Amino acid sequence: MNQDTQDLGSDTQTQHDQHGRWPQAETVEDFRRNLAAVHARIDASCERAGRDPAGVRLLPVSKTVDEARIRLAYAAGCRCLGENKLQEVSRKWEAMADLTDLKWSVIGHLQTNKAKLVARYAAEFQALDSLRVAEALDRRLQGEGRSLDVFVQVNTSGEASKYGLQPDETAAFLRQMPSFPSLRVRGLMTLALFSAEAARVRQCFVLLRTLRDRLRQECPQGVGLDELSMGMSGDYEIAIEEGATVVRVGQAIFGARNTPDSYYWPAESGPDAAA
Ligand SMILES: *Cc1c(COP(=O)(O)O)cnc(C)c1O
């Protein structure tokens, strides 16, 4: 295990054995209970790591969840939701335009032909990993007269199938960001290895944090690296022990998904096969 790993939390296990078994939330009460349970685990993880829970934002992820259940989550207090795919979320944006204080965070790979939708409707984009997308987004944002909070996605698992920049490409990428004045870089985002082996999952989070700490020292003006978006239902507690400021949690709040994860991050073929 890496030296940077905090000894205190190193026994924390993943909840990946729960994967696909979280019960469906069907009522506002279910959502309240699930949100409270996740917040309690966030607080406990912060306690172990000696962190202030105010420094960790829970981003509920509502992909595959239909409008009716999203409205229940809204009633239970959710005001920002993460979605992975544009074709899915753009329908929801239209259907739920009446919920004017509900913000949407796009957390999945973006194709340039969808940049206009993100520029118009999203509050945040967490999966920036190409200059082409940066360029397309910046141009669309200027057209809208808006700016957008973005996270740069880094591949920390070494899996060819995962999106994101290689860690050693990230510094050069960040140096280009001042060319895109409508993008406000807030930090880095990653998906850990999907494994029940907690130590290997933790390595991914340690890698993102140490990369961030290193890049901070040479960061161009206007590029912020305060945020680390890492951790999902199966591993957010470990991510928090390693410094996550945003955790993206779907199934532990909404219930198990039927859609296999390979639909969102292809396992067999290369990332471009998903396009
Ligand atoms: C679906 C998704 C999550 C949440 O996964 P859960 O297992 O539902 O918690 C987190 N990050 C990204 C990028 C996702 O697509």
Image: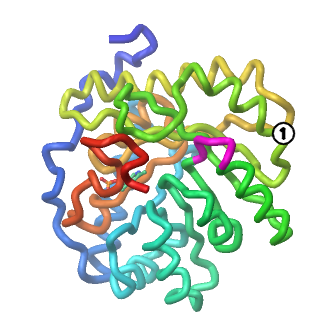
Residue 83, percent across and down?
46, 64
Is residue 40 or residue 80 the one in the foreground? Answer: 80
**Based on the displayed image, in which of its 4 quarters is residue 94 positioned?**
bottom right
Is residue 132 or residue 68 the one in the foreground? Answer: 132
Residue 131, percent across and down?
68, 42
**Based on the displayed image, in which of its 4 quarters is residue 75 positioned?**
bottom left
Residue shown at the point (39%, 39%) measured from the top left: 162
Would residue 33 be found to the left or right of residue 189 on screen? left
Would residue 99 be found to the left or right of residue 180 on screen? left
Q: Mark 1 points at which residue?
A: 178
Is residue 77 or residue 207 the one in the foreground? Answer: 207
Q: Does the residue labelled 1 lie within 8 Å of ligand 1?
A: no
Q: How many labels does the image show?
A: 1
Residue shown at the point (81%, 71%) measured from the top left: 144
In the rendered view, tell whether residue 231 sits above or below residue 175. below
Residue 55, percent across and down?
57, 44
In the rendered view, tell whether residue 118 sits above or below residue 197. below
Residue 54, percent across and down?
57, 48
Q: In which quarter of the image is the N terminus?
A: top left
Where disc 1 sits, the SS reads helix
Asked whether residue 51 is in view, the answer is no
Residue at the farthest top position: 3
Q: Which amino acid does label 1 sit on?
A: Pro
Residue shown at the point (27%, 22%) measured from the top left: 199
Asked whether residue 183 is in view, the answer is yes
- Range of the magenta residues? 128-132
Residue shown at the point (28%, 23%) measured from the top left: 200
Residue 146 forms part of the magenta stretch: no
For the rendered model, the colour scheme is rainbow
